[in-house]
Amino acid sequence: MLKRKAITSIKKWAQNKDHKCLVVLGARQVGKTFAIEQFAKEHYDEVIEINFKETPSAKEIFHDDLTVDTMIMAMRFRYPDKKLTAGKCLIFLDEIQECQEAITSLKFWAIDNQYDVIASGSLLGIDYNRPSSYPVGYVDYLKMYGLDFEEFLWAQGITDKMIDTVRQFFIDKKKVPDSIHSQMMSYFRSFIATGGMPEVVQKYVTTKDFRIVDTVQKAILQGYLYDIAHYASADEKLKAEKVYLTLAKQLLDKENHKFQYKEIEHGGRAQKYYSSVDWLVRGDLIHLSKLVTDVRYDVSDYERDDFFRAYATDLSLVIAMKDFAIKQHIVENTLHGNTKGGIYECAVADALHKKGHKLYFYKLPSSQKEIDMLIQYQGQVIPIEIKSSNSRATSLRSLLQAKKEIPFGYKFIDGNMGTSNDRIITVPLYMIGLLFN
């Protein structure tokens, strides 16, 4: 059974819920249902679980008055074997985006405060024309993603104590012993090839067969394409699918990872495709790193909407867009050129996104040099360069020389720990999954 950080977050909500319902949001197949069910087994005598996709007829429970007494009565008739004892029963509304009345009901469950209610769903299907789809002030939110690298390590049997040992080398700025470093890079490459979708990771753990992993990845990718076809408007379906399927080409097949509409089709333009990019972002299928015109806090004040990089919300999905052979190259470290650099950039973006960071990138004035990523952490702007070897970080060095107020920058490499005299901290790639919590 996979250990998920989200379960700990749900426990914290249960201890401090302050009369609110919990809404767990996330893309398909990231493990929302599993996490909620595991939490419920430990904390409640029974669970009323309603999946609005699986049983659309359950929407009838919310067709009448949305008083708690009325809804509980409807549930008793539908589930006569359930006791529905207040305080001992969790009401779990799964795929809630399929039932607007159930979303509205969250306000009344919260006001009544007799039952704990957790809802889960994706951002697909939400009516963005509404001022607010969920009742403001009556719900807490938990955003859930696929497994991060630390959770992947847990699945391999790596303990917290072992992970803390590796993290301590970063804190002390000491070289990681070669035997540990080599094994950690091996785990990290396996994670890149596998991605963080729970079903994929579980298959890898039980079989160690990347062909089976590839089959599951491609099935999940196909499910995402089905979701686009199901939820996108008639005008957006084909365009959104084209945008989505071009991610691997944008990130792995060319040196410049800026999103280019011409890669979608010859003569492609923002006028035609930007609405599809926006739809994919709103639906939690992709996330963007936007170009900023300056590197200072608050960096979001300087972002541009017309220059960006687009990443899938999990590594699995980009890897599934490529031929099976890429997994072997990743694991055996035989990638070269743009593909290797692109893969590592995707892995760093994946790690930072799953930690809740918004990503940016920066182009130095009067040059072609770019800073791969910027994040804001503890009130500071942190520049990040990603290298497939321990080559010179000329862009990062130039930025730090020009911006004395930036205390340091990170260079993540396919190599070991190190520092330099010009405020550049060199860090192994796998550390990105253990930092910036």
Image (cartoon, rainbow, N blue to C red):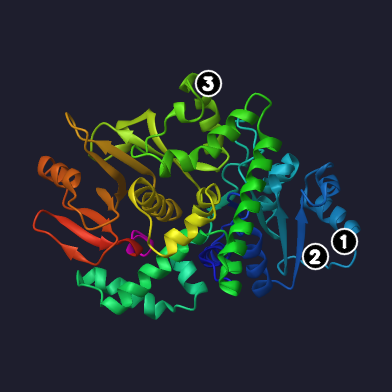
Image quadrant where one finds the N terminus: bottom right
What's the residue type where badge 1 is placed? Tyr
Image quadrant where one finds the C terminus: bottom left
Cα–Cα span, label 3 and label 2: 51 Å
Q: Bounds of the magenta span?
A: 431-437
What's the residue type where badge 2 is placed? Leu
- Report the residue marked by disc 1: 79
Q: Secondary structure at mark 2?
A: loop
Seen at 46% across and 30% down, the residue is 263
- Is any atom of residue 379 visible in this view? no
Mark 3 Cα-neighbour bin, 10 Å: few <14, some 14–19, many ≥20:
few
In the rendered structure, which disc, 1 or 2, sits on the residue that comes first in sequence? Answer: 1
Tag 1–tag 2 contact (CB < 8 Å): yes
- Report the residue marked by disc 2: 84
Cα–Cα span, label 1 and label 2: 9 Å
Q: Which mark is residue 272?
A: 3
Mark 2 Cα-neighbour bin, 10 Å: few <14, some 14–19, many ≥20:
many
At which x and y percent is residue 259?
A: 41, 33
Q: Which mark is residue 165?
A: none
Tag 3–tag 2 contact (CB < 8 Å): no
